[in-house]
Image (cartoon, rainbow, N blue to C red):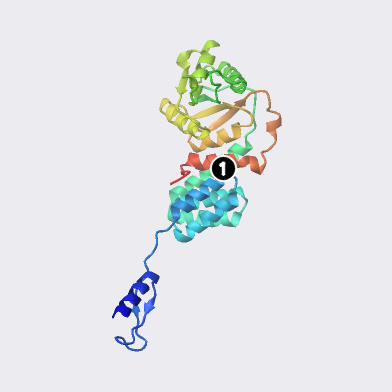
Amino acid sequence: MRVWTRLQNLAATLGVAVVCAAGLGAGQALFVPAVASAAPTTSLYNSAQYKFAHRDVPGGLGDIAALLRIAPNDAQALALQAIWADYVYDLPLKAGAQGRLNAVSPATAAGVNRVFGAIGAGIATLPNPLPSVVGPQTAIVALGYGLLDNGAMRPELEQRMGAVWRQAIIAPLSPIVVTGGAPHNGVTEAAAMRNWLVARGIPASRILTESRAGSTVQNALFTAALVKPRGVVNAIVVSSANHVRRAVTDFVIAGLPVIGVSSQIEGWPEALLPPLLDAQLSIYVDATRTFGLPATR
């Protein structure tokens, strides 16, 4: 009996069938079901997101494929697979992921389609140093840039603010949003930008300050939440010439359509060229974050 008990324990561990010659007839077996181990979907998801952010897109897609073999109806994984398949131009993989996602979560599938539209709009955007004539339903959004340790603005941010000032003069009825946190010496990027504008004649009452954002994704999400209740329906985004495409993508996904961009004069001719695929990677990473696909879970 001791031997039989040990065989039963071994069978339970291995999940196999054991035949007892003494107690069961020929061909009869005692089946002990295997104990299912926990699916490593969280580890695979986190690994994929890390690899996407660190430019290992094939590796990230491999992790997502492994995750979907375990959990084929994981909507977040299917969304990532569709978006990153688009990045590497794997159209069959993209179509398959979209089809499966539409069956699992039509709302998420529709959102992914909007992400594709936003990425296309961002990549097609051309930096433009010239201001546009717009009205009160269009916000002028100034994106922050890292301050010096003493809280002063770096030259690149001062150049951005020149573009903001020109746009503000051409469109005197438009509200201005300055967005950026990352305080240095007790001064946030938004506060530094606001002070710069007020010192040059822009009324403080015209400026909305968003001082929590620590990334372009947060610039877009927090600004949209700030201005939509005030009747703003779209925006002109002001940033550096090499940054406006990513900003446009994020703002469109956040639900604030971008009808124009303005950039500093320096560097904009070089930025007129279409971005190379490697340069587009940050646009795709930001798009997934703005859409709400977490970096880790």
Total marks shown come to 1
- Left or right placement of residue 200 versus residue 209 in this view: right
Q: Position of residue 55 (x, y in %)?
A: 60, 45
The residue indicated by pointer 1 is 284
The percent position of residue 76, horizontal first and vertical second, equals 46, 50
Q: Position of residue 224 (x, y in %)?
A: 46, 31
| Residue 222 seen by the camera | yes
In which image quadrant can residue 95 be found? bottom right
Residue at (49% x, 19% y) in the render: 185
Q: Locate residue 72, reporting x and y percent.
A: 46, 59
Can residue 176 be seen in the rendering of this structure? no
Task: Name the quadrant of the N terminus.
Answer: bottom left
Is residue 109 or residue 181 the one in the foreground?
181
Secondary structure beneath disc 1? helix
Report the amino acid beneath label 1.
Tyr
**What residue is shown at x 64% (from left), y 40% (from top)?**
279
Choose top left, top right, bottom left or bottom right for residue 200. Answer: top right
Q: Residues within 10 Å of mark 1 (few under 14, many from 20)?
A: many
Q: Residue at x 45, y 15 (%)?
A: 205
Name above or below for residue 18 compared with residue 57: below
Residue, x 46% and y 33% (percent of image)? 221
Nearer the observer, 224 or 241: 241
Is residue 269 toward the left or the right of residue 23 in the image? right
Q: Is residue 115 left or right of residue 90?
A: left
Query: Farthest bottom residue?
Result: 26
| Whether residue 105 is situated above or below residue 266 in the rendered picture | below
> For this view, does 237 lie left or right of residue 227?
right
